[in-house]
Image: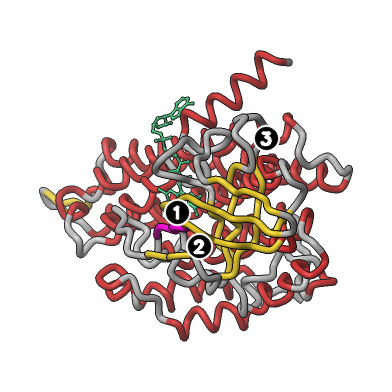
Amino acid sequence: MPPSVEALRRLCREDLEAGVEDIEATGRLPEEVVERLGQLGAWRLGLPPEHGGFGLPLAQLVPYLEAAAEGPAPGRMLVHLSNGIWRPIHRYGQPAQQELLAEMGRGRAFVAFALTEASGGTGRDLHSRATRSGDKWLLRGEKHLITFADRATHFLLTVASDDRRAPDSLTTFLVPRDTPGLDIDSSQGTMGLHGTGHGFLRYQDLALPDAARVGAVGQGLEVAMHFLDYSRLSLSACMVGLAQRALAESLAFARRRVTFGRPIADRQAVQGHLARMQALLSAGRALVREAAAAYDAAADAGGLGSEDLSALSATTKLYCLEMVGEVTDRALRVHGGWGYTTQAPIERIYRDARGFWFEEGTAEIQSLVVARHLLNR
Ligand SMILES: Cc1cc2nc3c(=O)[nH]c(=O)nc-3n(C[C@H](O)[C@H](O)[C@H](O)COP(=O)(O)OP(=O)(O)OC[C@H]3O[C@@H](n4cnc5c(N)ncnc54)[C@H](O)[C@@H]3O)c2cc1C
């Protein structure tokens, strides 16, 4: 039986939240809470039962993602990534790589997604290069902004395997952390999302066996998109959860803050902010739930990977990142100057919400996917 959504919410919203000052200051996670999240089953909610998971479809996962996102960022990031990153390995991984899935569900293995480069554009423009020699590959290049570079036991690393810059020029590898030639520097500081261990990967002579390949040679873009089509929806559910938290903070503050003898909650100007936040949030939640149902239907019909689904996923992310941006803007305004201080939770929530502009692709790139789909139809 999967855990209750409430149990996950309590662990993230209360137990992880209790250590948030330390997380913000040091980036270190309270490992005892992380352990309890694992014991609850948070890493294997969507994982298929044959690998020890609960096999929840996305529509049933969404409430867990929303609940996790009400607490500090590392909680939702762990739940989001663990319940997504197994998918490309399950679909494209070689039989020996599939054995990692159960370990991931138990929290003994943790895979980070490594695509973005400082030297090139994401997608066909990757500059990292894999050269094949017999049964071996030699990888050269760099990645940055890799979430949980600090704690990942493996990296799902996508690089160019020829110089054509074509859709079939990328290949993906599953690389254990301790592989000689892989230099990991997890000191990349970020505006928000503290405790999510972003970092650089650098590799000049990273030798990998062909057994490390995930999917066929040239299938790397498809492997990455298999993850991204799912994870843009998963991330959208997290945006709904964070927006819900921003609204809850705003309601509580509006009730307790008194100016000119009355709580600011009595003022129509403040009520306008609260009502607009609720309207945006409700629309975002409805869109995520509808998109999750469509994702599950496509998965049941063997239709993952379609252009329709990529466009739906991008549309959902595009709306939800605008939604969480405006909700957290308004929440900050409701809090007045106190909200701008580091004592106020909304200060952290506001910063954390800005990460969504970039995670799993920018708004501009989502727009490009959506517009291309509309024009091609
Ligand atoms: C919190 C966080 C977590 C992340 N986690 C990961 C991770 O785990 N793994 C990973 O691989 N990456 C990760 N990233 C990286 C993220 O996916 C990229 O930052 C994002 O895709 C944008 O790429 P870029 O930073 O290279 O921006 P750039 O490509 O440099 O874009 C700069 C600007 O130009 C625009 N632009 C660029 N190209 C085009 C184009 N062709 N058409 C129109 N506009 C364009 C962009 O929209 C943006 O406004 C993370 C980023 C953040 C902030």
**Residue 41 position by quadrant:** bottom right
Q: Check disc 1 and report the residue beneath it.
A: 242
User: On screen, 240 above or below 318?
Assistant: below
Q: Check disc 2 and report the residue beneath it.
A: 76
Return the residue nearer the eye: 305 or 292. Answer: 305
Which residues fall within the magenta stretch?
Answer: 199-203
70 to the left or right of 92: left
Q: Check disc 3 and report the residue beneath it.
A: 310
- What residue is rendered at 54% in x and 62% in y? 67
Q: Quadrant of the C terminus?
A: top right
Tell me residue 282's x, y (percent): 54, 42
Mark 2 lies on a secondary structure that is helix
Mark 1 lies on a secondary structure that is helix
Tell how many labels.
Answer: 3
For the residue marked with disc 1, what is the amino acid? Leu
Tell me residue 176's x, y (percent): 59, 70
- What residue is rendered at 62% in x and 45% in y? 228
For the residue marked with disc 3, what is the amino acid? Ser
N-terminal-most mark, 1 or 2: 2
